[in-house]
Amino acid sequence: MLRLTNVVKNFGDRPILRGISLTLPAGQKVALVGPNGVGKSTLMRVIVGTEPYDSGVLRTDANWTTGFLPQDAGVRSNRPLWDEMFAAFPEILAVNQELREIEKSMETAHGDDLDRLVERQGDLYDEFDRLGGYTVEADAHAVLAGLGFSQDDYTKRALEFSGGWQMRIALAKLLVRKPNLILLDEPTNHLDARATEWLEEYFASYPGAAIIVSHDRKFLDRVISRVFELEDGLIHDYNGNYTAFEAEKKRRVAARAAAYSRQQKFIKRQQDFINRFRANARRASLVRSRERMLARLEREAVPPTEPDTMKLKFGEGHPMPAELIVAEDMAKAYGDRTIVSDVNLRIIAGQRIALVGPNGAGKSTILRVLAGIDEPTAGTVRRATVGYFAQDQSQTLDETRTVVQEILANAPAEWGEERARGLLGRFQFSRDTVYKMTGALSGGEKSRLSLAKLLLKPVHVLVMDEPTNHLDVRTRATLIEAMQVFKGAILFASHDPDLLEALATHVLDVRDGKAVLHTTDYAGFKERLEAAAEEEEVEEDARVLELEDEIEHLQQRREALEEALEALQGEAKVASQRDHAEVTSRLVEAEAELEALALAPA
């Protein structure tokens, strides 16, 4: 169990947590919600012990373990993926590595040396079993497969993976550890639909507790049974999933508003009486009594109001050219590794092109080249004025500047601080936060600042890489609305199903080094994928039946040849042996193909 009592955290003279009290029993999964910058990540760091707090009490059960996946998580080590899974189990990792060394030495050892290696190998296998190595191995295989890794990935070094896959490695390491409490800050930002679905199923059977920050309502609805809302430095507790929380919060706000209204009417009546009879000596005692009553009255708190919605409208360049981006035979390579090639696109106003495909396929690379951030290795790209939103905000923000300095550095020369602060106010930056260093901002605040920078000049094309990552639900909805009314073209990569379904008019499918444009919305693209998958499954089932029939026929033929061999002599026997070898070889091939089909992911 986790228990916080009156936990307070200040940054300088700015209170973040004003007295947090909560209890989380073992096994319960909760959502932590609230606007960007309210302190959700700070509270998580306090719970895991990486952020000190000023006062209050934080208690957990004895031997309680925690694991935390922050927004910017990612494993960038030089270790192979498989070894990374054992990083939290150093004893098992050491045994595993020695076993590998012994297996290599056994290839050239002889006599007594070989005997010693075999004996040591047996001892190590016993030690591996005692340490729970086989259980960890099984868990690692299951988690890696669920998050989309293949066994071919096991020997790749972590730093060779793209940023999205490095986040998956960090998540996999956390899940393999099986802590009593898992804290996840936007875990689905870099997960595709299949990996997200697997994570939902994982939590359904996971015995530990979890605190999850996520903008993905559907994910929260399927995983959590309770909501902690962080508002004004305090926690408000709601039972039920995220949809139930939204409904209950509306009811509570309405009830508090009604109570506040009734109390204001009562106060007004009493004040009117006091004002009316203040000079009346006969009513003096009544007046004093009512004044004392009003003084003692515990005033109903002003009902909470929704925070000001971020005001966002992208400036559109004029005039609008007929073609906004033209890519011809575009290719991009890093060193001798080609990421994409033969990309041909003609993009016009009104198109909203969603880039989809596996993590690491090259979506971010294509966006960077089309936006002019990177140069193509081959081919050409012509473009009108582009506004670029990076997935990693550290690419576009100078962490040595304050928020207001970042705006002024990118604004027209005639802008002053007052005008910059006015723009930032539209993006929910308060009087205090405009002077924060950009490096100290939360993920959501960095995203809002980057969006504000996009408004500093009119553009013909928006190129956006995971634009809804780190945004709270309200800000995300505002962004989607602004993108829908933008009259230029938009190219965007996203794992956000709401954004994909609301915006995409075309889909650019990026995989295997190629980019194929589909002239359909996201729903139509998914239907095509499902139809293709069904057709492939039918073909695979037919192939399985064909192989099973062939294997049965080959087994019968081999048995017949074995019987014939016993009765034959001389040249006839040699010929039959040759036939037997050919049949056996084909039988092995067919069985291997059948096994590969059986092991292929669904």
Image: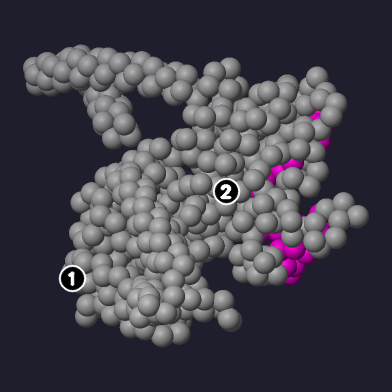
Q: What's the CA distance linking mark 1 and mark 2?
A: 57 Å
The quadrant holding residue 536 is top left
Residue at image mark 1:
130
Residue 304, visible in the rendered structure: yes
Instruction: Name the element at disc 1.
Output: helix
The answer to if 394 sits in the magenta stretch is yes
Proximity of marks 1 and 2: CB atoms separated by less than 8 Å: no
* Label located before the other in sequence (1 or 2): 1
Q: Residue at x 26, y 50 (%)?
A: 240
Q: Nearer the viewer, residue 28 or 278?
A: 278
Q: List x then y, in percent, for residue 582.
A: 28, 21
Q: List x then y, in percent, for residue 56.
A: 37, 83
- Up/down of 19 relative to 531, above or below: below
Q: Which residues are magenta?
A: 381-410
Q: Nearer the viewer, residue 32 or 575?
A: 32
Q: Which mark is residue 54?
A: none
Amino acid tagged 1:
Arg
Residue at image mark 2:
309
Residue 368, visible in the rendered structure: no
- The mark lying in front, picked from 1 and 2, is 2
Instruction: Name the element at disc 2.
Output: loop
Q: List x then y, in percent, for residue 413.
A: 90, 55
Q: Residue at x 86, y 56 (%)?
A: 415
Q: Residue at x 85, y 60 (%)?
A: 416
Q: Nearer the viewer, residue 507 or 544?
A: 507
Q: Is residue 108 left or right of residue 407?
A: left
Residue neighbourhood size for the residue with mark 1, other residues' Cα within 10 Å, grouped as few (<14), some (14–19), many (≥20)? few
